[in-house]
């Protein structure tokens, strides 16, 4: 898991506002299906991983999440994410045609500065609706590394680790981003 | 019921009623007549290397703990305390010295033997712990790393049960010296569909790939893509089946490893680098047959090349849990293993660019079949009825096309045979 300091997060109101608005904008890109604009918020060298979560015995709980040497739900670099967007753009990606109605709610933004980057943890809840009665919910926490850049509000995403609160996924597939 | 069943499946005409996919009575019969008599995949040996290592799985809806024993063998028992029926082991996997029920504290050793009972004196003199072991899965056997369990004494051995399907399975698990291991982590997700929809697709169906997966094929297609070589309808292929109900299909390799387009470049390179060794071990047909789809009856499927294994665990007639593993060659260097893991995740995990589309189909089929009319619709299983059958030595009957319903008709013929047997057949 990504390391976040033991200290309490940064209180700087301007920084907090800027980072929070960055995430609200990102959620809007996803919910508006502007996936190319969403991807543009990542560095070209970005990584995006969603590990598998397991129920472990007490002594082994430190490996509750699958590592980068195991299988994951997503294990992506920038090009991989772009390839998924190309799939969506064919209009024949049947798990997203008709597209999901998603609502990404991003809360509990906590920021730590390290020497060059911002380490940010956010909570999320995502609603996914399809057709008439297919509804799914995802909950979890994102551990991001943000870099100062010429991106949205002067920031870009250089890595994201998504920790789902689900073990067995009660969905026919994961066809949305977190 | 037997006559009803025979009316639902008519392969003289090549038709089958949609009802077999959602009738609760049929599902109950399947549990008794098919799943209780068949060898079911439990886990891979590499998941439980050391004494006390365990993996929690299911045989249909019965929770099972599979544990490595002190003598190196593998035992499996029902994950249920004999006292009040509580779940004994509540972790997905791990290492244990004993399994202690959290309800009243009955404690079982790693073979499932009852070792201690709190306040045992309250049961009196006649209480004998030996009578109250956890219920052992009657038979547990491995085939080249794949661990299977079976509840039936009358069933044939695992090798007999696999029959000619072992021929192609060897192309996956015995391709290189040292065999295979699974990547850490098991994908688990839920599709609201009948287990046979998934099993049938993997036993029979290459036909869906260019349509269902058109968006993934477009996204994975490299600039080097050669339609004459790689497009599914331009390639020679075969479908095969066995009397046990197993079967599969593949594009016939042309002196190459024949990897599917959705494996990573490093995996492709590895399959090519190791091709000569594979030819020496298993011959050119299986060394190159890395692109195919297979189901081992009833509910264990795999795809070569990308190397995903999966069980379609039934959850009633209308739902499955997909449990999916990624297989890698044991002797491969770490970067190759990583490439195979990534390939499994990106193509056939729950977010897999191909996998996504399959769940979409099966879920919607299942919903529709709730309708009074829709459940009695006769579905068409006639494809390839005109094809000539021929034998491949060691692998039994084949037809010379991947586009056929021959393996599906065989799958359901076996299904009907077991379902209508007076005594459990197996």
Image (cartoon, rainbow, N blue to C red):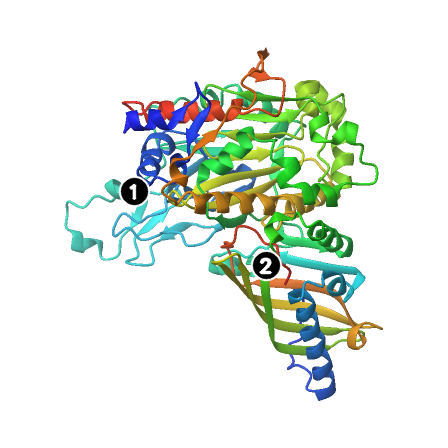
> For the residues carrying marks 2 and 1, which lies nearer the camera in this image?
2
Q: Is residue A51 left or right of residue B129?
A: right
Quadrant in which the N terminus of chain B is drawn: top left
Secondary structure of residue under mark 1 = loop
Q: Pinpoint the chain carrying mark 2.
A: A
Q: Nearer the viewer, residue A132 or B183?
A: A132
Q: Nearer the viewer, residue A128 or B48?
A: A128
- Tell me: residue B24, above or below residue B426: below
Label 2 and label 1: CA atoms lie apart by: 49 Å
Q: Residue at x 71, y 21 (%)?
A: B279
Secondary structure of residue under mark 2 = loop
- Tell me: residue B323, above or below residue A145: above
Residue B230: which quarter of the image?
Answer: top right
Q: Is residue B326 left or right of residue B134?
A: right
Q: Nearer the viewer, residue A25 or B16?
A: B16
Where is residue B173 shown, x and y percent of the image?
61, 30
The residue that mark 1 highlights is B133
Is there any visible trace of residue B415 in the rendered image? yes
Where is residue B129 shown, x and y percent of the image?
25, 44
Quadrant in which the C terminus of chain B is drawn: top left
The residue that mark 2 highlights is A100
Q: Residue at x 50, y 29 (%)?
A: B296
Q: Residue at x 38, y 42 (%)?
A: B317
Q: Residue at x 68, y 50 (%)?
A: A91
Where is residue A35 shown, x and y percent of the image?
72, 61
Where is residue B9 shown, x and y percent of the image?
39, 26
Is there any visible trace of residue A3 in the rendered image? no
């Amino acid at each position: 898991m990504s390391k976040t300091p033991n200290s309490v997060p940064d209180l700087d109101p301007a920084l907090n506002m800027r980072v929070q608005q960055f995430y609200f904008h990102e959620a809007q890109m996803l919910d508006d299906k502007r996936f190319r604009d969403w991807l543009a918020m990542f560095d070209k060298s970005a990584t995006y991983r969603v590990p598998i979560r397991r129920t472990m015995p007490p002594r082994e709980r430190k490996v509750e999440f699958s590592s980068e040497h195991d299988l994951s739900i997503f294990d992506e670099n920038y090009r991989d994410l772009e390839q998924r967007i190309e799939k969506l753009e064919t209009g024949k990606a049947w798990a997203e045609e008709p597209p999901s109605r998603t609502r990404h709610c991003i809360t509990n933004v906590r920021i730590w500065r390290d020497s060059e980057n911002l380490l940010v943890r956010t909570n999320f809840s995502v609603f996914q609706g399809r057709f008439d009665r297919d509804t799914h919910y995802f909950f979890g926490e994102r551990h991001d590394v943000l870099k100062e850049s010429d991106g949205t509000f002067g920031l870009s995403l250089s890595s994201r680790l998504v920790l789902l609160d689900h073990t067995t996924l009660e969905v026919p597939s994961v066809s949305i981003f977190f | 019921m037997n006559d009803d069943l025979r009316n639902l499946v008519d392969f003289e005409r090549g038709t089958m009623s949609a009802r077999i996919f959602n009738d609760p009575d049929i599902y109950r019969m399947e549990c008794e007549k098919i799943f209780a008599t068949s060898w079911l995949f439990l886990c891979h040996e590499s998941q439980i290397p050391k004494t006390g290592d365990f993996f929690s799985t299911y045989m249909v809806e019965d929770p099972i703990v599979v544990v490595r024993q002190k003598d190196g063998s593998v035992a499996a028992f029902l994950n249920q305390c004999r006292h009040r029926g509580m779940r004994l082991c509540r972790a997905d996997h791990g290492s244990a010295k004993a399994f202690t029920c959290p309800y009243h504290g009955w404690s079982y050793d790693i073979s499932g033997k009852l070792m201690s009972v709190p306040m045992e004196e309250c049961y009196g003199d006649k209480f004998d712990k030996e009578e109250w072991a956890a219920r052992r899965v009657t038979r547990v056997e491995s085939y080249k790393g794949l661990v299977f369990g079976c509840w039936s004494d009358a069933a044939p051995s695992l090798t007999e049960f696999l029959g000619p399907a072992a021929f192609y399975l060897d192309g996956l698990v015995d391709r290189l010296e040292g065999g295979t291991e699974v990547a850490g982590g098991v994908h688990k997700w839920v599709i609201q569909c009948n287990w046979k929809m998934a099993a049938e697709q993997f036993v029979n169906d290459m036909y869906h790939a260019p349509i269902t997966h058109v968006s993934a094929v477009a996204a994975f297609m490299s600039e080097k893509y050669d339609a004459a070589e790689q497009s599914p309808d331009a390639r020679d292929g075969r479908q095969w089946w066995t009397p046990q109900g197993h079967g599969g299909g593949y594009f016939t390799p042309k002196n190459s490893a024949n990897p599917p387009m959705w494996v990573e470049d490093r995996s492709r390179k590895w399959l090519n680098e190791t091709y000569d060794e594979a030819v020496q071990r298993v011959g050119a047909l299986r060394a190159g047959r890395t692109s195919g789809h297979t189901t081992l009856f009833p509910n264990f499927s795999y795809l070569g090349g990308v190397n995903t294994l999966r069980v379609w665990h039934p959850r009633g007639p209308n739902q499955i849990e997909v449990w999916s593993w990624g297989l890698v060659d044991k002797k491969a260097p770490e970067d190759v293993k990583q490439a195979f893991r990534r390939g499994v995740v990106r193509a056939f995990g729950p977010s897999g660019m191909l996998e996504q589309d399959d769940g979409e189909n099966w879920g919607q089929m299942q919903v529709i079949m709730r309708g009074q009319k829709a459940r009695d619709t006769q579905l068409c299983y006639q494809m390839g009825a005109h094809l000539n059958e021929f034998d491949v030595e060691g692998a039994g009957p084949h037809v010379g096309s991947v586009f056929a319903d021959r393996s599906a008709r065989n799958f359901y013929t076996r299904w009907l045979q077991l379902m209508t047997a007076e005594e459990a057949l197996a």
